[in-house]
Image (cartoon, helix red, strand yellow):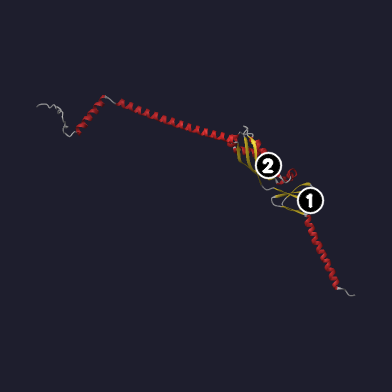
């Protein structure tokens, strides 16, 4: 019996081509179904099965899931930055506009709770409202001037309130800072006037202290001079005066050159010369 080699080769070739095609189609089908999920660095995965949230936290790497049945949701656990603005009233009822900034992150072991309560929009749903509430609560405990003079204390107070609130939702506050306090124009003018008055007061006090010191110095100098004159007066006696006169006459004789002064239009002074 003769075997048709060409027919066998055609049949074999056709079968191999169909198997290859089916294999490629199956791989494409698997890729489309996506039976695996990748949890990227800096994230954690939350798995849902027909919408039901699993209690397991999935770390970085590849995880197999059931296509069309399970979905892996990624939650960013890296440090994130947020900024916000808010209006509040101080203890003395001054209007305060506050600008703040903070760094925060989701606690990796709490991503399931965060996803269940807040979803993936943590910043909009909890961070901004919590910041505004903490700022209002802390601002109301200080006067407008204290908000300026006790700024570090106010910052720490806001951070404490904010941390307590966000910790309940699995979020940690890493850093918090007050960028700016803005007050009303009338308050700023009042502060400027008060500062100017205090500066003038300090200057007046310094001038008064300087004048007082100078006056005390003059009194001390006058007192010392008076005491010196009194002492000199006590030392002046009749004998001392006579001695000073004799000394002056002696000095005058020593300076005389023996020539009588020339006198014009007058009488020559009479000199009494004793006779022998």
Q: Residue 227: where, in percent of width, then height?
A: 35, 27
- In the rendered image, the residue lying farthest to the bottom is 2
Query: Left or right: where does residue 17 sit relative to residue 221?
Result: right
Q: Quadrant of residue 218?
A: top left
Mark 2 touching mark 1, by CB under 8 A?
no
Q: Residue 66: where, in percent of width, then height?
A: 80, 52
Query: Left or right: where does residue 65 sit relative to residue 262?
Result: right
Tell which circle, 2 or 1, labels the residue nearer the N-terminal end: 1
Q: Dot 1, how many residues are within 10 Å of its Cα: few (below 14), some (14-19), or many (20+)?
A: some
Task: Work out whether 17 lies above or below 222.
Answer: below
Quarter of the figure that contains the C terminus? top left
Task: Work out whether 38 lies above or below 184.
Answer: below
Q: Dot 2, how many residues are within 10 Å of its Cα: few (below 14), some (14-19), or many (20+)?
A: some
Tell me the tag on residue 70: 1
- Residue closer to the observer: 229 or 213: 213
- Residue at figure coordinates x 78%, y 56% from the top left: 32
Mark 2 — residue?
128
Q: Residue 85: where, in percent of width, then height?
A: 65, 41
Q: What element carries label 2?
A: helix
- Residue at figure coordinates x 56%, y 35% from the top left: 189
Q: Residue 7: where, in percent of width, then height?
A: 86, 71
Q: What element carries label 1?
A: strand
Nearer the observer, disc 2 or disc 1? 2
Task: Work out whether 232 lies above or below 135.
Answer: above
């Amino acid at each position: 019996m003769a075997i048709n080699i060409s027919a066998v080769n055609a049949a074999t070739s056709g079968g191999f081509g169909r198997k290859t095609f089916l294999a490629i189609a199956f791989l494409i089908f698997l890729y489309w179904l996506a039976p695996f999920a990748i949890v990227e660095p800096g994230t954690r995965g939350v798995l849902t099965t027909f919408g039901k949230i699993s209690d397991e936290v999935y770390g970085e790497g590849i995880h197999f899931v059931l296509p069309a049945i399970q979905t892996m949701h990624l939650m960013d656990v890296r440090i994130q930055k947020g900024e916000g603005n808010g209006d509040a009233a101080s203890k003395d009822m001054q209007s305060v506009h506050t600008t703040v900034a903070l760094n925060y992150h989701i606690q990796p072991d709490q991503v399931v709770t965060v996803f269940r309560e807040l979803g993936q929009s943590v910043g909009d749903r909890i961070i901004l409202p919590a910041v505004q509430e903490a700022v209002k609560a802390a601002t109301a405990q200080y006067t407008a001037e204290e908000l300026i003079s006790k700024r570090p204390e106010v910052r720490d107070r806001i951070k404490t309130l904010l941390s307590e609130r966000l910790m309940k939702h699995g979020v940690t506050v890493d850093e918090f800072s007050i960028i700016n306090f803005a007050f009303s124009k009338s308050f700023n003018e009042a502060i400027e006037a008060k500062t100017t008055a205090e500066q003038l007061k300090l200057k007046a006090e310094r001038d008064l202290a300087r004048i007082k010191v100078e006056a005390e110095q003059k009194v001390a100098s006058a007192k010392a001079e008076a005491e010196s004159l009194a002492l000199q007066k006590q030392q002046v006696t009749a004998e001392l005066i006579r001695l000073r006169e004799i000394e002056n006459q002696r000095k005058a004789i020593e300076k005389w050159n023996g020539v009588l002064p020339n006198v014009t239009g007058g009488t020559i002074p009479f000199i009494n010369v004793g006779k022998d």
